[in-house]
């Protein structure tokens, strides 16, 4: 049976697509859909879209699965698999970038990860068995995440095959493995904990009281909010469920929490395109909208980018995602004060050198001492937000990243690249 027959059977032409939505794209529904695509010998893509924004692309040839990408952390997943199965390639990033510099638009549309695997197998840099392990691990991880997600819409896009001769995997094998893992997570009562989230210590004082010094120091080093459950398990050469289960007592008691973190940046192509140099990003965490608005007017008038955060409980995850170049923190806020948030940020390596300025209505010696103790860079009164004082603070703490430095950079220092789609 060919693609034309398939197209007619669900009433769309080879250039159209049809979207079918379901609240729960569970394992039985997945098995039924893949079985239908196999019977119809479907060539093209199965695109899965979550209402929250996650998107996965499953590539098929004659109804068999070729590869998959997308989701929360496609680049992190790729990096983990390279490290696990082809560490010699993972250690040589120049090899990956060299291959991508000559990638064609057609290969790009097929997905750059698969293009690299095919190219490396063809050149003898890796074996077909190694490539197959990476493909299998990727498919199982993607389909597990799809199973754990809700509000999935799926779309079929008939098209040219993208098999390229590495391996064709029967969808029933993938579904069976995902089902096995899913049942294990259910039995461990860990099904509500998403492996793409990163653990971080929420209550260090309480955790220290409930653990030995050795255990606390180990957890303090591991759970820094920079690596996901999958990342940490991979680093420790453990199954993700096994590692997650070891953290369940801390997660269930609220001593440790899971947060969203961004993916690694995608590799880039060698196709010429203009690169925009972005100005420094300034963040202000203050439950007062008036203070945030005042700072925003000043920052944007000076050419800085700005983000104001009025909900202190959301501040940490937002700051972690945006990684601003300088942070203003209000001292007195509901639920968490500036000292606590500053101390929490300093525990993470990416914020250890970020200028953090405490905003307060008081100008006492005690507050200034506390500011230094928690690692804040400076102290600024917000009784009357003085433009001159703010400007002086900016110049003092952003000397390494001022607008004048950015605009004076020579264009020759930047290669022109295009991100891989």
Image (cartoon, grey):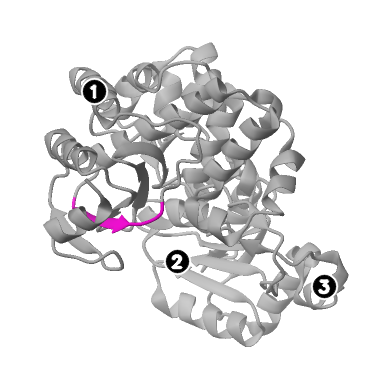
Q: Is residue 334 left or right of residue 408?
A: left
Query: For numbered disc 3, what is the local secondary structure?
Result: helix
Crowding at label 2, few (<14), some or many (≥20) Cα neighbours within 10 Å?
many
Taking the spot 75% from the left edge, 76% from the top edge, the residue there is 403
- Sequence-wise, the earlier of marks 1 and 3 is 1
**Which of the numbered marks, if any, corresponds to residue 176?**
1
Magenta stretch, residue numbers? 151-160
Q: Is residue 334 on the magenta stretch? A: no
Distance between the alpha carbons at the discs numbered 2 and 1: 49 Å
Taking the spot 33% from the left edge, 48% from the top edge, the residue there is 43
**Is residue 343 visible to us here?**
no
Using the image as rendered, state which of residue 231 and residue 37 is in the foreground: 37
Distance between the alpha carbons at the discs numbered 3 and 2: 29 Å
Using the image as rendered, state which of residue 181 and residue 220 is in the foreground: 181
Give the dominant element type of the magenta stretch: helix, strand or loop: strand
**Which of the numbered marks, if any, corresponds to residue 286?**
2
Whether 185 is drawn above or below 271: the answer is above
Of discs 1 and 3, which sits in the foreground? Answer: 1
Q: Position of residue 419 (x, y in %)?
A: 60, 61
Taking the spot 61% from the left edge, 68% from the top edge, the residue there is 281
Crowding at label 1, few (<14), some or many (≥20) Cα neighbours within 10 Å?
some
Of discs 2 and 1, which sits in the foreground? Answer: 1
**Is residue 222 visible to us here?**
yes
Q: Position of residue 53 (x, y in %)?
A: 33, 58
Q: Which residue is mark 3?
A: 405
Q: Is residue 349 left or right of residue 159?
A: right
Taking the spot 70% from the left edge, 49% from the top edge, the residue there is 353
Using the image as rendered, state which of residue 271 and residue 370 is in the foreground: 271
């Amino acid at each position: 049976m060919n693609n034309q027959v398939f197209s007619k059977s669900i009433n769309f032409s080879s250039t159209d697509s049809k979207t079918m939505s379901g609240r729960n794209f569970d394992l039985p529904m997945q098995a039924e859909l893949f079985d239908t695509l196999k019977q119809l010998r479907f060539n093209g893509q199965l695109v899965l879209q979550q209402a929250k924004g996650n998107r996965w692309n499953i590539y098929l040839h004659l109804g068999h699965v070729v590869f998959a990408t997308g989701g929360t952390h496609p680049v992190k997943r790729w990096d983990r698999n390279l490290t696990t199965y082809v560490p010699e390639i993972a250690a040589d990033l120049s090899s990956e970038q060299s291959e991508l510099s000559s990638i064609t638009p057609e290969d790009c549309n097929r997905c750059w990860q698969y293009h690299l695997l095919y190219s490396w197998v063809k050149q003898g840099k890796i074996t077909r068995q190694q490539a197959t392990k990476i493909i299998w691990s990727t498919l199982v991880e993607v389909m597990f995440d799809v199973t754990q997600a809700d509000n999935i819409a799926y779309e079929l896009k008939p098209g040219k095959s993208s098999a390229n001769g590495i391996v064709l995997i029967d969808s029933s094998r993938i579904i069976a493995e995902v089902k096995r893992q899913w049942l294990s997570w259910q039995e461990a009562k860990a099904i509500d904990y998403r492996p793409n989230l990163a653990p971080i210590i929420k209550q260090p004082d309480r955790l220290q009281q409930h653990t030995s010094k050795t255990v606390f120091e180990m957890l303090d080093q591991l759970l820094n909010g920079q690596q996901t459950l999958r990342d940490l398990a991979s680093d420790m050469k453990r199954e993700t469920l096994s590692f997650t289960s070891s953290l369940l007592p801390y997660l269930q008691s609220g001593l440790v929490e899971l947060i969203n973190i961004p993916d690694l940046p995608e590799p880039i192509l060698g196709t010429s395109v203009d690169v925009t140099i972005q100005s420094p990003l300034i963040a202000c965490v203050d439950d007062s909208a008036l203070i945030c608005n005042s700072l925003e007017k000043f920052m944007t008038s000076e050419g800085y980018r700005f983000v104001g955060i009025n909900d202190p409980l959301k501040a940490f995850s937002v700051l972690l995602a945006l990684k601003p170049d300088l942070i203003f923190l209000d001292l007195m806020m509901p639920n968490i004060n500036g000292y606590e948030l500053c101390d929490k940020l300093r525990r993470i390596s990416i914020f250890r050198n970020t200028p953090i300025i405490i905003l307060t209505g008081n100008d006492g010696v005690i507050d200034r001492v506390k500011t230094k103790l928690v690692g804040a860079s400076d102290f600024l009164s917000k009784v009357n937000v003085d433009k001159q004082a703010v400007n002086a603070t900016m110049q003092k703490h952003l000397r390494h990243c001022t607008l004048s430095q950015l605009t004076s950079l020579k264009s020759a220092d930047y290669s022109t690249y295009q991100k891989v789609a």
